[in-house]
Image (tube, rainbow, N blue to C red):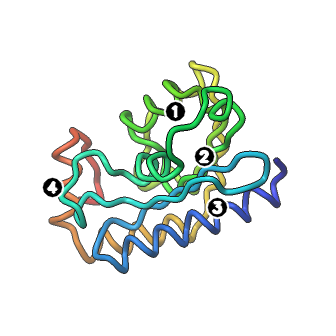
Amino acid sequence: MNVEQDHQFMQDAIKEAYKSLKEGGLPIGAVLVKNGHIIGRGHNQLLQKGSVILHGEMSCLESAGRLRGSDYRNCTLYTTLSPCPMCSGMLILYQIPRVVVGESSTLQGPEWLLEENGVEVINLALPECQHLLEDYISKNPDIWGDEMERVGYTTDLK
């Protein structure tokens, strides 16, 4: 993949984040790409479905369905926010070799863990991704704070 393709696929992940926002959820989205084609799409559905695991990345892999191991090893996951420990574990478990992150300044996941396990992490540091989540947090501080407390994160944006 090249930088232009990374930005193109990130736009698809951003569309998923807006879909979540429109549904009343946290604006985080993801797409799974294999050989230049999107094979999975997802967005955060914690609030919409009362789920504890349907983060954007988890929802994305779920939508791709059961793939062969070799398929996962030929994919790139695009996500609007740095993956949390659970989603990072999923990337490691399925041996997805590359993750492209929209931004990590709002919430920093364990990118070091991904890198230590052979996952290439590309952070595009896109203001659009940052502003989308920061705007949500400023309008919904209690919801954000509850979600962060639930998973043990502390943040100044609560």
The CA distance from mark 2 to mark 1 is: 8 Å
Check contact, mark 1 vs mark 3: CB within 8 A: no
**Amino acid marked by disc 2:** Leu
Q: Secondary structure at mark 1?
A: helix
What label does residue 17 carry, if any?
none
Check contact, mark 4 vs mark 3: CB within 8 A: no
x and y, in percent, of residue 86 in the image: 36, 35
User: How many labels were placed on the picture?
Assistant: 4
Residue 155 in the image: above or below residue 26:
above
- Badge 3 is on which residue? 10
Q: Quadrant of the C terminus?
A: bottom left
Q: Quadrant of residue 109?
A: top left
| Mark with earlier residue (4, 2) | 2
The residue lying at 63 percent from left, 53 percent from top is 39
| Mark with earlier residue (4, 3) | 3
Left or right of 2, for residue 94: left
Check contact, mark 2 vs mark 1: CB within 8 A: yes
Q: Is residue 83 at least partly visible in the picture?
A: yes
**Amino acid marked by disc 1:** Leu
In-front residue for pair 27/51: 51
x and y, in percent, of residue 7 in the image: 72, 62
The residue lying at 62 percent from left, 41 percent from top is 99
The CA distance from mark 1 to mark 3 is: 17 Å
The CA distance from mark 1 to mark 4 is: 25 Å
Pointer 3 local density, CA inside 10 Å: few below 14, some 14–19, many at least 20 = many
Query: Which-is-in-front pick, marks 1 and 3?
Result: 1
- Badge 2 is on which residue? 77
Residue 47 in the image: above or below residue 93:
below
- Badge 1 is on which residue? 91
| Mark with earlier residue (1, 4) | 1
Pointer 2 local density, CA inside 10 Å: few below 14, some 14–19, many at least 20 = many
The CA distance from mark 4 to mark 2 is: 27 Å
